[in-house]
Image (tube, rainbow, N blue to C red):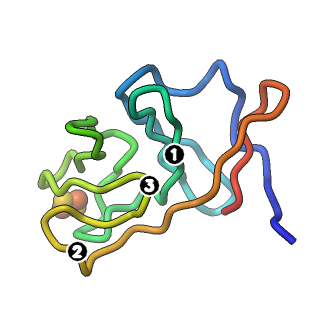
Amino acid sequence: MPNFTKLTTESELPPMDEAKEFPCGAKTICVANVNGVYSAMDNICPHRGGPLGQGMIEGGKVVCPWHGWAWDPKTGEAVQNPSAKVAVYPLKIENGDVLVEA
Ligand code: FES
């Protein structure tokens, strides 16, 4: 059974075409808002550990603030290196709460 936990509230989500980081138990989750669609992924960039939630969104991808690798927030794949992947998590919004299965 999927096990969704509350990450934040809808009002705390990032504005259009921005990303933001949220604590989630022992992890930190990056939520990206691409054109009004929210996605959740691990906040730690697999390249060298940069904070993806502090990055920008360009062309629908989350760009790591450290060395500029771009990550697809839907699939977790890196544009620069398709074999590199960050974990992505199902996200849903219910009654103003943002829930992730992480
Ligand atoms: S740590 Fe993210 S691109 Fe290098």
Tell me the amino acid under the disc marked 1.
Answer: Ser
Disc on res. 82:
2
Amino acid marked by disc 3: Lys
Q: Quadrant of the C terminus?
A: bottom right
Quadrant for the N terminus in the image: bottom right
Q: Which residue is mark 3?
A: 74
Picture disc at residue 39: 1
Q: Is residue 84 left or right of residue 10?
A: left
User: Is 49 left or right of 96, judged from the image as shown?
Assistant: left
Distance between mark 2 and mark 3 Cα atoms: 14 Å
| Left or right of residue 84, residue 28 in this image | right
First along the sequence among labels 2 and 3: 3
Mark 1 lies on a secondary structure that is strand
For the view shown, which residue lies furthest in the bottom direction? 83
- Real-space Cα distance between discs 1 and 3? 6 Å
Q: Is residue 56 above or below residue 10?
A: below
